[in-house]
Amino acid sequence: MSSAMAATGTAASQAPAVELDGVSITFKLAKGSTYAAVAETKLDVAAGEFVAIVGPTGCGKSTLLNVAAGLIKPSTGHARIFGARLAGLNIQAGYLFQQDSLMPWKTAIDNVAVALEIAGTSRDEALQRAQAWLGRVGLGAFSHRHPHMLSGGQRKRVGLAQVLIRNPRILLMDEPFGPLDAQTRLIMGDLLLKLWQDDRKAVMFVTHDLEEAIALADRVVIMSAGPAASIIGDYPINLTRPRDISEIKLEPEFHRIHREIWTALKAEVLKGYSQGDMVGAG
Amino acid sequence: MQNQLLLRFLQLMVAVVGIGFWHFATTTSLFGRPKDIQFFFSTPLDVFWRIVKWFSEGTIWHHLGITLLESVLAFVIGTIAGVVCGFWLARRPLLADVFDPYIKGANALPRVVLAPIFALWLGLGIWSKVALGFTLVFFIVFFNVFQGVREVSQTVLANARMLGMTERQLLRHVFIPSALSWVFSSLHTSVGFAVVGAVVGEYLGAAAGLGYLIQQAEGVFDVTGVFAGMFVLTAFVLLIDGIVTVVENRLLAWRPQTVQSAT
């Protein structure tokens, strides 16, 4: 490889996977009034970095994620993806939604395979690779079930396979394990870490669960309560990898970080509660 | 198992008691002179033998075939038109708003009053009946497709977009399956209405078909014929409904199983 190519290669890899630059989001409400969901925010997520965004309900975490996905256009500022300004949908990103997002009329394997088929992969090959991915998320034996025949956790696994089979460079996750029970969340967290350990993508992981955020992420970002929410804290998590979630939660370092972040977060959560009327998405 | 057997037995008993009552009320002098009562109610045995006669002589097949043909045509044409219009309007909100009052008005009109006009326009052959069935089926399918396309889960849609689907792929993988699921869930109703359209049309003026058969019998005070026609028609609709249930179970396998009410 020539030195010039190597130089450009480094430059490209140095551009953050996601760069939110001066992004603010204001929603138009009925009767002509407006609601400022997110105040001017700057956030960088490096390639291969796992960033968790934590904040009180209704603080605009998901809104920020939707900007990175290209689903919402920011009112001011812009998003850059690997240095290129984002216009339209972010095709480099895979998005795992909080709500059920599988097509209910397709079986698990069809739901996963369709992600390849629409990009032009032949059906046979798509099915083969989809089956491999379902095996990777532990659902190899459930490939011909429809979503309603799967549990909430299993549906999330199918969703994960559906998103990852496209091999996106960025993974956006909006409280993906929110609706699941505590044990299932733990298992899903470990699965996510294992998959991410094998192939490190840039991850933006929105959650309201601080413990989950610390256990998973390289960096935890705290958002203030809305309206006009902004980032009020950015904490590096220097816990060793690979991690096991249930074990890492027992380590003294985990508790120290948890205490430190919770002190900052608690004030915002209380503020969020006292504000009563919370408009806009969480 | 025990309960199932008991249930079947009780169901059978209702028929036995009902037909038994009918038999004794029309053949004994319990409620008056049997001859008078039979003029209005016939007797179960007469009706039974009439049905046997129709089938053994083979005359009924022609009428059944005509009614079936009309129902199928009304169902197929009505469904296709309903799907196309439903899709078209659901994807063009402005057009939907413009046509909204007219669609509501057309749907509010009791379609039976159109039968004479269709007979006038299209003659006494099958097409006037198909047209009547069409007007009934069309609106059911249309409203279901319209609803189905508009009420696609926003999350499923956003997810499909994030997976990289183009508008055409969204149509194929999201909108059409969603709308079709609504069409299939209204299958029982729309097939039923297709038959209603055919039979009512025949009743009001035709040369063949089950409705025509009943109307002819009524015209000569042949109560046995009317009752026999009614029973054949009931069996005919139940049979079609059974076929629809089989088709539905195959096509809607992805849906959560709901308790099927006994039809």
Image: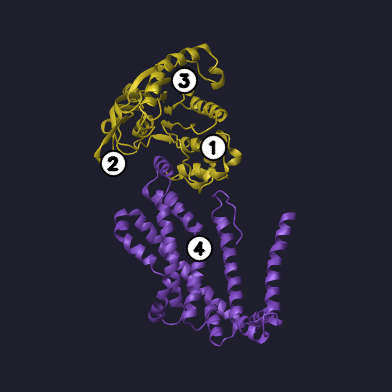
Chain colours: A yellow, B purple
Give me the chain letter of mark 2.
A
Task: Please tell me which residue lies in front, B138 or A187.
Answer: B138
Residue A143: image tag: none
Query: Which label belongs to residue A152?
Result: 1
Of all chains, the one bearing label 4 is: B
| Residue B58 figure quarter | bottom right
Same-subunit check for callouts 1 and 4: no
Which element carries disc 2, helix, strand or loop? helix
The kind of residue tagged 2 is Ala
* Rendered residue at 42%/43% (across/down): B160
Q: Tell me, yes or no, whether dots 2 and 1 are on the same chain.
A: yes
Q: CA distance from mark 2 to mark 1?
A: 35 Å
Subunit that carries the residue with mark 1 = A
**Label ID, residue B189:** 4
Query: Can residue B59 be spotted in the picture?
Result: no
Q: For this view, does A244 lie left or right of residue B180?
A: right
Check disc 3 and report the residue beneath it. A214
The spot of residue A47 in percent (x, y) is 39, 25
Q: CA distance from mark 3 to mark 1?
A: 24 Å
**Disc 2/disc 3 C-alpha distance (Å):** 39 Å
Q: Which residue is mark 2?
A: A30
Q: Secondary structure at mark 3?
A: helix
